[in-house]
């Protein structure tokens, strides 16, 4: 797939991410903060003498080795002792800007073709089959100046996978039959992308590029381009011309030793080295300094600046430096208070070594959308803020204060790196940066260059670096000649667009900034600038990163080691009793013995302690990841099912809470803390961050949930009608945007839930409720819901038992009606899930989007397995990798039905099932539905022909994947919370699945498969037809004609879905899915 919509979130440098590092052997339990910050040796390496020494986080247990092969291919080997899964990625410095102009999209097509086969491994599905055996996957992307290939697999299969992978780049096949087959996949990808709202800005940029620059070329590829004569020779020529080993970097990570991995990379020495220099593109590609209007269904205002490249400024990070102040000052709050915007987000959008695009995406309020002058007004405010920024940063004292904050945050984020860069990202960096900085270059800010920062501010002030994009659904196309004498003001008032791109299916108009507009937006307004505030000093940056020891606490216990054999025989209440305060009293041990017991406890994959059975308060001390963090979660489960209005009220309340949190807690959220708030069919709030301040942060966050609180003690002003109106607009916009997603996303997110679950609320009906509901009604609904709920909570990480008890009690009480006598009885909501037993149902929908060019169709077949049994999980885990791989090879690679093909097993409440998804334009969904069933028949034969050795390899690969321990504190917290929030407490499900898989024979698996997918098949086929597919491919015009067509063409044995005739399972529990 291409990564043309390439974005790097600036928050990567400023925010701590949501997972942590693997456990490793005993180290000193305390890492002093000042020692970590002041020890410059881990950053200030002599690059010439230390090229082989990788700068890595203080707590990183991995071992690294940098090698340059004889053919100049750069290699980074990573030994990870704690992961069963191996990953590898290769990056080559050649992309779409290198391809010949007569074959636009050739680089992307070459990316597709390298996966198809090689001289040594000519069978097209060989690599995919190998990955399936090893519970693996693969993907790739093509960018402007690089192409990136990556895969993952269990370590057992790494040797063979690497050899196959190496031959992608040694002796790929570009034979006529393989090329012909893969063309449709590229064209299907093109049809999906040009029909997507998310690609419109990217494609507009291509249209606005200098015609002499390769950025102006169509780089995706489609039928028209790829069917040109000579495409096979063009592919071979492109590969031979640009795929040189000295332009490649390879990263491999596995539990295999560095020495053994070094032996495994020998095949990569056979990649040809042509001693090429990477292509240099030194000029700015885009022609800016104008306003562009374009038709879109996702209304938004975008400001984009084309700035100098930042690749050489990895230690200074000038754009991140400025963005920190823009996001944490009061610019966004000021525009919200003026009722101009709903939100503003910023990011780096498409960059190469010679340029960087800094983009602000702005969602306007309804009031702003009605005012043609608001674009100029918002741009003026932003330009004045940039001018004020220049004034602030000219002060040495202030710029040093900001730098010290950012340096401290960046070093903390790096040293306690909570998400390791994946191998794909590392391979890209290795091809661009010094080898020893492959891990640190994305994170560390350690050099202050005031002149450089002020230079970037000057670039932001230059209007010729700016493009303003206005997307609106009310614009329409007209081929009338444009009046060249129109002012920018008149241009903005005009709803007609006069330019069209059939290739990108875009309608737009553009106009250069006139002098009046430039003067208006760039003129200094002292009164306006007097309203801007600098970010406050960040008090949430931690000073104490010491890890706790339970041996220092007089009230802590170590949980007992409980075996899965014991758990799987117990009901829920028995499990709760087993875990209630279950542990060893540490006071019985001497200091030395206590430390040994604590280490033993940390190394075991133990379960948490239940601190309070009535309140469902859980705790687990976990410092083996060596991070001074806490993961905390709180759930409120409602007594009754929600009415449509109550559901809408909760969603509105959620948006209001998020809005105030983003305002009041922006500094901690840019300092290593994160939160999630979800008020849906139950309310959940999760927090992750440094243990020093997480308690205070959680208390502030959970206060937003409590509609009973004393308003004077809360920062959530519910009486503010403006915030309520913004929440209504935000909710409305979020739902409308769901209907503009790709068809397959709509099928999964909108239509399937309504079919499977009886009380699932239709987003279209929620939209109707939004207009009707008042603020008082919303508050009453939320109070009624929250008045009687069941609480549960979990705290895991750098926290002892006494603090966990105090924090759990505080968190649960802060979101509670003190006057209510709510019970903590075990609330068992009955969820109605459709019962398809023996049925073959079809639900076909004509998606009238207004786009006659959207010729995509989606087939989403749901096969119901039945109510949860313990054995289901084992069978499902065995089937999933091979069913997915075979479906992909047959439906996508062989038949070329569409670019999007996927298999996923899905649990709905207590009912297991499987989804098979295809989106494409080759066949209509009714036909694809039948093809999927034909494939399932063939897959039964595939299972029959699988020999015992292959079956045992499959079992081993799946078991290896299930044995994979959490790789971070947040991952472990999420895993435990899944079971606690569901109420099933099935902590043992992975081990149980492993034990059951070991017992399964091939005939058992075949029997389960045939019963679920063939002999007793229970199926619902959801089919979405894009407007262009109906009007162009099927030659139908009306909904009535479409309904008649579906009725006449459905298989005889199938019935059209009728909700009035549906029957339902009544689920009393929520099964979890591994």
Image: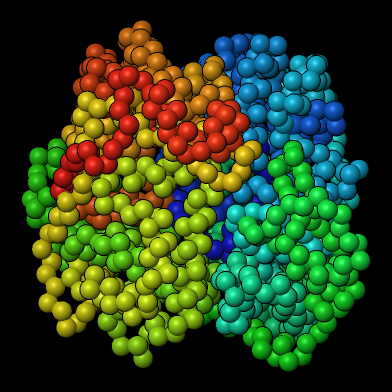
Image quadrant holding the C terminus, namely top left
Camera-side residue: 101 or 128?
Answer: 101
Give me the residue at 53% from left, 47% from top.
Answer: 741
Vertically, is 598 above or below 615?
above
Residue 872 as seen in the image, left or right of residue 82: left
The residue under the point 74% across, 52% down is 477
Find residue 704 and report its horizontal and vertical position in percent: 36, 76
Residue at 35% from the left image edge and 31% from the top image edge:
842
Horizontal and vertical percent position of residue 826: 12, 59
Which quadrant, please, contains the N terminus?
top right
Where is 1032 relative to 984, above or below? Answer: above
Quadrant in which residue 1020 is drawn: top left
Q: Is residue 237 visible?
A: yes
Q: Position of residue 1046 (x, y in %)?
A: 42, 29
Left or right of 735 on screen, residue 684:
left
- Residue 365 is situated, as x and y percent measured from the top left of the image, at 58, 72
- Residue 882 visible: no
Q: Closer to the camera, 1031 or 389?
A: 1031
The image shows residue 325, relative to residue 167, as above or below, that is below
Q: Quadrant of residue 330?
A: bottom right
Q: Would residue 950 be found to the left or right of residue 121 on screen? A: left
Query: Which residue is at a point 66% across and 85% down the rendered structure image?
Result: 532
Name the residue nearer the viewer: 477 or 670.
477
Q: Give above or below for 845 relative to 368.
A: above
């Amino acid at each position: 797939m291409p990564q043309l919509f390439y974005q790097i979130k600036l928050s990567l440098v400023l925010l701590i991410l949501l997972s942590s590092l693997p456990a490793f052997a005993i180290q000193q339990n305390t890492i002093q903060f000042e020692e970590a910050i002041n020890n410059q040796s881990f950053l200030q390496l002599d690059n010439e003498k230390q090229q082989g020494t990788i700068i890595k986080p203080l707590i990183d247990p991995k071992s690294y080795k940098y090698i340059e092969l004889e053919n100049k291919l750069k290699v980074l080997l990573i030994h990870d002792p704690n992961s069963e899964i191996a990953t590898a990625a290769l990056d080559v410095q050649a992309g779409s800007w290198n391809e010949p102009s007569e074959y636009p999209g050739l680089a992307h097509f070459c990316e597709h073709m390298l996966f198809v086969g090689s001289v040594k491994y000519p069978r097209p599905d060989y690599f995919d089959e190998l990955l399936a055996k090893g519970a693996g996957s693969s993907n790739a992307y093509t960018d402007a100046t690089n192409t990136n290939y990556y895969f993952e697999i269990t370590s057992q299969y790494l040797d063979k996978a690497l050899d196959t992978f190496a031959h992608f780049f040694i002796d790929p096949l570009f034979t006529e039959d393989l090329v012909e087959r893969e063309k449709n996949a590229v064209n299907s990808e093109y049809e999906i992308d040009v029909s997507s709202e998310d690609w419109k800005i990217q494609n507009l940029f291509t249209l606005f590029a200098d015609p002499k620059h390769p950025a102006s070329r169509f780089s995706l590829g489609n039928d028209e381009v790829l069917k040109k004569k000579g495409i096979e020779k063009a592919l071979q020529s492109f590969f031979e011309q640009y795929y040189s080993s000295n332009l490649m970097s390879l990263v491999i990570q596995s539990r295999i030793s560095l020495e053994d991995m070094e032996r495994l990379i020998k095949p990569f020495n056979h990649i040809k080295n042509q001693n090429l220099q990477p292509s240099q593109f030194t000029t700015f590609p885009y022609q800016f300094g104008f306003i562009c209007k374009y038709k879109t269904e996702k209304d938004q205002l975008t400001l984009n600046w084309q700035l100098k490249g930042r690749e050489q400024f990895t230690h200074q990070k000038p754009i991140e430096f400025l963005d920190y102040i823009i996001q944490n000052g009061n610019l966004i709050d000021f525009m919200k208070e003026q009722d101009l915007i709903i939100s503003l987000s910023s990011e780096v959008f498409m960059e190469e070594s010679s340029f960087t695009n800094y983009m602000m995406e702005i969602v306007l309020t309804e009031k702003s959308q009605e005012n043609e002058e608001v674009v100029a007004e918002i741009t003026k405010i932003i330009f004045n803020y940039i001018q004020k920024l220049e004034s602030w940063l000219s002060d040495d004292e202030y710029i040093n204060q900001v730098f010290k904050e950012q340096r401290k945050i960046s070093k903390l984020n790096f040293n306690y790196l909570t998400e390791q860069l994946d191998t794909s990202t590392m391979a890209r960096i290795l091809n661009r940066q010094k080898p020893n900085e492959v891990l640190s270059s994305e994170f560390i800010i350690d050099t202050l260059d005031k002149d450089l920062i002020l230079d970037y501010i000057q670039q932001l002030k230059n209007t010729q670096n700016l493009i303003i994009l206005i997307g609106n659904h009310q614009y329409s196309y007209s081929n009338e000649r444009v009046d060249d004498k129109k002012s920018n003001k008149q241009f903005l008032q005009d709803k007609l667009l006069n330019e069209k791109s059939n290739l990108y299916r875009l309608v737009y108009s553009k106009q250069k900034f006139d002098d009046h507009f430039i003067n208006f937006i760039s003129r200094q307004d002292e009164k306006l600038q007097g309203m801007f505030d600098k970010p406050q000093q960040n008090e949430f940056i931690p000073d104490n990163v010491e890890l706790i020891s339970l041996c220092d606490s007089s009230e802590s216990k170590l949980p007992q080691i409980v075996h899965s054999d014991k758990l799987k025989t117990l009901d829920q209440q028995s499990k709760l009793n087993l875990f209630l305060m279950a542990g060893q009293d540490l006071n019985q041990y001497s200091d030395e013995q206590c430390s040994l017991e604590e280490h033993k406890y940390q190394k075991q994959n133990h379960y948490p302690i239940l601190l309070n059975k009535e309140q469902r308060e859980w705790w687990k001390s976990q410092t083996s990841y060596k991070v001074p963090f806490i993961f905390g979660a709180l759930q409120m489960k409602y007594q009754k099912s929600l009415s449509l209005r109550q559901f809408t009220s909760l969603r509105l309340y959620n948006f209001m809470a998020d809005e105030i949190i983003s305002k009041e807690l922006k500094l901690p959220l840019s300092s290593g803390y994160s939160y999630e708030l979800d008020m849906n069919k139950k309310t959940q709030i999760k927090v992750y961050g440094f243990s020093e301040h997480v308690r205070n942060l959680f208390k502030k966050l959970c206060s937003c949930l409590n509609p009973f609180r004393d308003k004077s003690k809360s920062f959530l002003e519910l009486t503010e009608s403006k915030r309520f109106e913004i929440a209504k607009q935000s909710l409305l916009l979020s739902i409308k945007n769901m209907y503009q997603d790709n068809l397959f996303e709509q099928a999964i997110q909108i239509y399937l839930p309504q079919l499977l679950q009886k009380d699932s609320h239709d987003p279209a009906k929620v939209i109707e409720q939004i207009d009707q509901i008042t603020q008082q009604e919303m508050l009453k609904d939320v109070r009624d819901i929250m008045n009687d709920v069941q609480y549960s909570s979990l705290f895991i990480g750098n926290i002892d038992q006494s603090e966990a008890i105090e924090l759990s009690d505080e968190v649960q009480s802060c979101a509670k009606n003190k006057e209510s006598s709510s019970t903590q009885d075990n609330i068992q909501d009955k969820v109605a899930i459709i019962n398809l037993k023996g049925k073959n149902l079809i639900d076909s929908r004509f998606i009238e989007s207004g786009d006659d060019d959207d010729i995509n169709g989606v087939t989403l077949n749901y096969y119901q397995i039945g109510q949860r049994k313990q054995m289901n999980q084992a069978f499902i885990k065995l089937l999933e990798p091979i069913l997915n791989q075979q479906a992909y090879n047959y439906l996508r690679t062989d038949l070329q039905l569409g670019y999007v093909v996927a298999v996923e097993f899905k649990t709905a409440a207590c009912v297991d099932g499987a989804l098979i998804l295809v989106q494409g334009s080759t066949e209509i969904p009714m036909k694809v539905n039948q093809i999927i069933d034909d494939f399932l028949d063939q897959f039964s034969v595939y299972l029959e022909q699988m020999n015992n050795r292959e079956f045992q390899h499959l079992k081993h690969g799946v078991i290896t994947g299930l044995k994979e321990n959490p790789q971070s504190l947040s991952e472990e917290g999420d895993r435990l919370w899944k079971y606690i929030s569901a109420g099933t407490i099935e902590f043992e499900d992975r081990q149980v699945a492993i034990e059951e898989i070991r017992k399964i024979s091939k005939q058992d698996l075949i029997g389960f498969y045939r019963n679920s997918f063939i002999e007793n098949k229970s199926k619902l086929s959801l089919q979405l037809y894009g407007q262009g597919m109906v009007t162009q491919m099927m030659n139908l015009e009306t909904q009535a004609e479409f309904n008649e067509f579906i009725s006449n063409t459905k298989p005889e044995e199938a019935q059209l879905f009728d909700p009035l005739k549906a029957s339902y399972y009544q689920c009393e529990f929520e099964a979890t899915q591994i």
